[in-house]
Image (cartoon, rainbow, N blue to C red):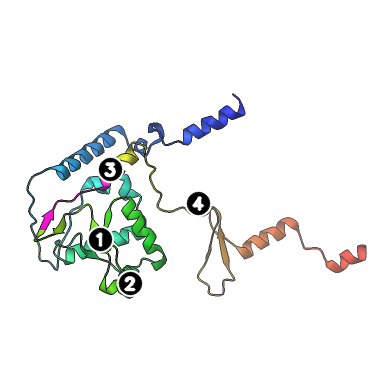
Amino acid sequence: MSAAQIVESNRAALRPTASNAPAELMDERTLDRHRADLMSLRRYRNSKSSFKLTLDVPPSLGFVALPAVLLESLVWASLGVYERRLIDFLLVEHLRHGRTQNGYLKATFDQLEAHRIPRRFIARVIEKLVELRLIEVVRRGGHAGGARQNPSLYRLTFVNHALRSVATEYLPARNDWIEVESAMLDGRRQSQKRHKGPSLKRRFNGTKDGTNLVIITDPNKEAVSVPEISAKRAETLGPAPDPAARARQR
């Protein structure tokens, strides 16, 4: 086989085909059950049956039901810690309003920052959740101080939501993420990774002056500090040459 054929073979192996799709990570029985659950949820979403909202608990104390097929999905597994914190914030807002305001949930950058999402990541987190179709931005709010008077409004796609017109109508969850999940299972869309760590990580061991720097090249190996590295190099190379003796030799 020529070099060109080898390169083309390697490229073909990396293409998102059915053979290396994320669905291959599941065994056949689990995959069949997962697809069946997705179809069941899609049928429920598309059904024309009447829907009524029932409040099982007081508005100040509530719970929300999440289907197992969502929690087992590749979409949910691709979420990072900041995406989960934003979803948790919107779920709490949903519950604090008696599960009647989904579609009109407010979340300012100040609130999300107080919920331990760094401000510089908030826009990126919202963009990813919209791309995965787990949330929908119903209305874009103002900037800076204007956001207090005109905040953004959000809708969680996997819980029941409200629609305001002449009167408020309550509708079942649309579960827009199902299409994204199906594309991931079929290999038409690559599953997003939560974090991509650098090849070389540096961290400090808690000292403020940073004199004892710890270098980690392999997470499975024990960290080695800079003084230890210097000592090992000295044992290998021997004592450093004397500049004065080198000058005399010249």
Residue at the image point whose x is 50% and y is 70% from the top = 206
Q: CA distance from mark 1 to mark 3?
A: 20 Å
Position of residue 113 in the picture relative to residue 59 (left or right): right
Q: CA distance from mark 2 to mark 3?
A: 32 Å
Percent position of residue 96, x then y? 17, 67
**Along the viewing direction, whichever of 30 and 70 lies nearer the viewer:** 70
**Residue of label 4:** 220
Q: CA distance from mark 2 to mark 4?
A: 38 Å
Q: Secondary structure at mark 1?
A: strand
- Residue 166: image quadrant is bottom left
Mark 2 crowd level (few <14, some 14–19, many ≥20, 10 Å Cα): some
Q: Amino acid at mark 1?
A: Tyr
Q: Earlier in the sequence, mark 2 or mark 3?
A: 2
Q: Are the residues flagged by discs 1 and 2 in contact, CB closer than 8 Å?
A: no
Q: Earlier in the sequence, mark 3 or mark 4?
A: 3
**Residue of label 1:** 154
Q: Amino acid at mark 2?
A: Asp
